Every structure is written in C-alpha cells, then in structure tokens.
C-alpha cells in the first residue's frame, strides 16, 4: 500500500469497522498489510477475517463483483470463504476519509491451515488441481459482469509505466500482443482467482479451501495453472523436494481434468503465462518494496529483471514429460 493510506488508517477507524460487524475489539490480530489491512478476529462468536481496503486499490463496484463471484463459487460447491453481513445487513461497509474511502468486508475463516512440507505430495497436488478445475468449471457458468477488471487493466500490468523502465515496458507490450492473439471463448477464458497459490488457501482433512479473491479478474484459465506451477517451483527449490516441476504438473492436471477439460495446447502455452506472472510480480515488488529492500532482495530483483528482459520464464517445463488427458 502507498504511504498515504497508512497515514489515513488509525485505531478509531479500525474500531469503527469492527463495530459495523459486531467484532470483539480485544480479538483483533493483524495478519497482513500488503494490499489491505487484514485482521483475524472473533465476530458473532466465530473466527473471522476482517479486511479493510482503500478505494485507491479497489472500488466499491469491484468489491461487489468479488462478492458475487464468491457467492457463485459457493453455489457451485467450491468451499470458498463466505462473506458475512454487517449490522446493517451489508456485505460491504464504507468509511469515508479525507482522501477516498475504506471499504470493510468480513469473511468466515477457512478451516484448516496453510500447507507445509508434510503435505507436499501427490494427493495434495491432485487436490490443488481439482479445486482449480472446479473454479474454472464454475467460471463457465458465471454470468459475465463488468465489475471485475480484464487482465490487461489490472494494477500490476498498468503500473509498469510508473517506474520508467523502457526495456521492460517493451517486453510487456510484446507479451500483451502475443496474448491478445490467443482465443478468448468462454471455454478457455473467464473470471479466475489469478493468485491461487499455497498462501491463499487452507487444507483441511485433504480438502482445499480457497480465500483472498481480491485479484479475481478476467483472464485465460491457463494463467491460474501457470501460477500454480510457478509457486510449486519455488517450494520445491526451498525444500529440496524429490518432486520435479513436471511431476507436480502431472499430478495437478490429474486433479484438474477430473473437474474441467482444457486442451493440451494451453498446457504448451504455460511458459508465456508464467512470463506474464514474473513481470507482474516484479512490478509488485518494485512498487511495494522498492524503497525498503535488503541487499539480498535487490540482487534477487536484479536477477529477475534480467530473466524478464531475456524473455525467459523463471520455470522451465519439459512438456514432453507431461501426460495428455
């Protein structure tokens, strides 16, 4: 978040938000301040998640679209975290400030926990893929709405022009041209989570429960798959797992295809979607951490920038090792 948003936020505003949803003040515990102010809390006797989002990040219409998408997923059997009504029977409460507004939402806390190294095995990969496929199957049945952004209008796509890096801007322009040439029929393109990595779901008795739909947008379904592969590759590297990226993807796709079918052509296209994700992550990190980075983070971003400039995805996939379904 930008510095001015932190300046607008204070304890009085937090307690006002809590009152709108009958949240116990002494139960509030900060979880994150990445894009919104996120707190765990007790609301109406249950564990909940409080999210306070500034209007510079999301409009009321965009958050309304997010709520509609979550409701649709739940109606289709996807165990997403359900929004909670306020004391005024609203899913979104607005608190005005001298610069814009804060929008307050509360969600039921997903059961379970984040996955760890002990979960990192075939059954978990299959369930990750199955849940992704279930969301894409639901997307095909979702009535189109203009309330959520198209992928090319998302912040991490447009913000690159803020940082004045002409070489990366040109890489992005070429990526956008290449992507815009791809088919966009409803069987391959629709509303997706777009950030469905292991930090944004809990696992409970073998079932994955998705949350944090703040970045849901219209995109190719393959982008969600590419994000999963990218996230898995980092986990594998950090844990010296015996699994390869190809083994992960084979298990993931076994689960995915049990819910939804995507032509193998889109699996072959994963590198271009991973490149787009690399660029979005780079822009996000520059914007959010650019003025407060360690030397190690600076070296990491410099290396990342060189790979983006070289048009090289951070994950190499040997497609010949991927099973066709």
Image (cartoon, rainbow, N blue to C red):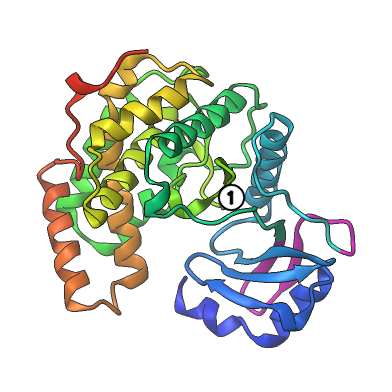
The quarter of the picture where residue 268 lies is top left
* Side (left or right) of 153 relative to 103: left
List x then y, in percent, for residue 294.
22, 78
Closer to the camera, 308 or 319?
A: 319
Q: Residue at x 55, y 71 (%)?
A: 31
Q: Residue at x 67, y 86 (%)?
A: 11
List x then y, in percent, for residue 128.
47, 37
Above or below, 141 against 151 in this view is: above
The quarter of the picture where residue 102 lies is bottom right
List x then y, in percent, for residue 237.
22, 52
Q: Quadrant of the C terminus?
A: top left
Above or below, 169 against 187 in this view is: below
The magenta segment is 87-105
Q: Residue at x 64, y 53 (%)?
A: 110
Q: Residue at x 32, y 72 (%)?
A: 289
Disc 1 element: loop
Closer to the camera, 69 or 227?
A: 227
Label 1 crowd bin: few (<14), some (14–19), many (20+), radius 10 Å: many
Can you see residue 104?
Answer: no
* Side (left or right) of 42 relative to 300: right
* Side (left or right) of 302 relative to 103: left
Above or below, 231 against 273 in this view is: below
List x then y, in percent, for residue 132.
50, 33
* Side (left or right) of 29 relative to 124: right
Closer to the camera, 21 or 209?
A: 209
Residue farthest toward the right in the current orientation of the protein: 88
Q: Is residue 312 magenta?
A: no
The residue that disc 1 covers is 211
Can you see residue 78?
Answer: yes
What is the count of numbered marks? 1
């Amino acid at each position: 978040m930008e510095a001015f948003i932190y300046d607008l936020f204070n304890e009085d505003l937090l307690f006002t938000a809590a009152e709108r949803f009958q949240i116990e003040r002494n139960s509030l515990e900060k979880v994150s301040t990445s894009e919104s102010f996120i707190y765990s809390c007790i609301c109406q006797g249950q564990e909940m998640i409080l999210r306070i989002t500034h209007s510079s990040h999301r409009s009321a219409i965009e958050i309304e679209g997010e709520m509609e998408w979550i409701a649709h997923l739940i109606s289709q059997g996807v165990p997403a975290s359900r929004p909670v009504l306020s004391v005024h029977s609203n899913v979104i409460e607005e608190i005005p400030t001298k610069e814009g507004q804060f929008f307050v939402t509360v969600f039921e806390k997903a059961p379970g926990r984040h996955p760890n190294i002990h979960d990192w095995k075939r059954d978990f990969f299959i369930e990750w893929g199955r849940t992704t496929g279930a969301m894409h199957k639901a997307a095909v049945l979702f009535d189109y709405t203009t309330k959520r952004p198209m992928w090319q209008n998302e912040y991490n796509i447009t913000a690159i022009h803020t940082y004045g890096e002409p070489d990366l801007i040109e890489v992005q322009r070429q990526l956008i041209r290449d992507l815009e040439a791809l088919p966009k029929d409803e069987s391959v393109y629709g509303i997706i989570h777009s950030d469905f990595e292991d930090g944004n779901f809990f696992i409970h008795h073998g079932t994955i429960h998705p949350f944090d739909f703040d970045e849901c947008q219209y995109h190719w379904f393959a982008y969600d798959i590419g994000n999963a592969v990218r996230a898995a590759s980092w986990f594998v590297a950090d844990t010296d797992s015996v699994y390869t990226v190809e083994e992960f993807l084979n298990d993931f796709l076994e689960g995915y295809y049990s819910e939804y079918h995507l032509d193998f052509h889109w699996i072959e296209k994963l590198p271009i979607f991973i490149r787009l994700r690399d660029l979005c992550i780079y822009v996000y990190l520059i914007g959010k951490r650019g003025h407060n980075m360690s030397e190690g983070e600076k070296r990491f971003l410099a290396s990342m920038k060189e790979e983006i400039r070289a048009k090289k995805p951070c994950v190499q996939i040997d497609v010949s090792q991927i099973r066709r379904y």
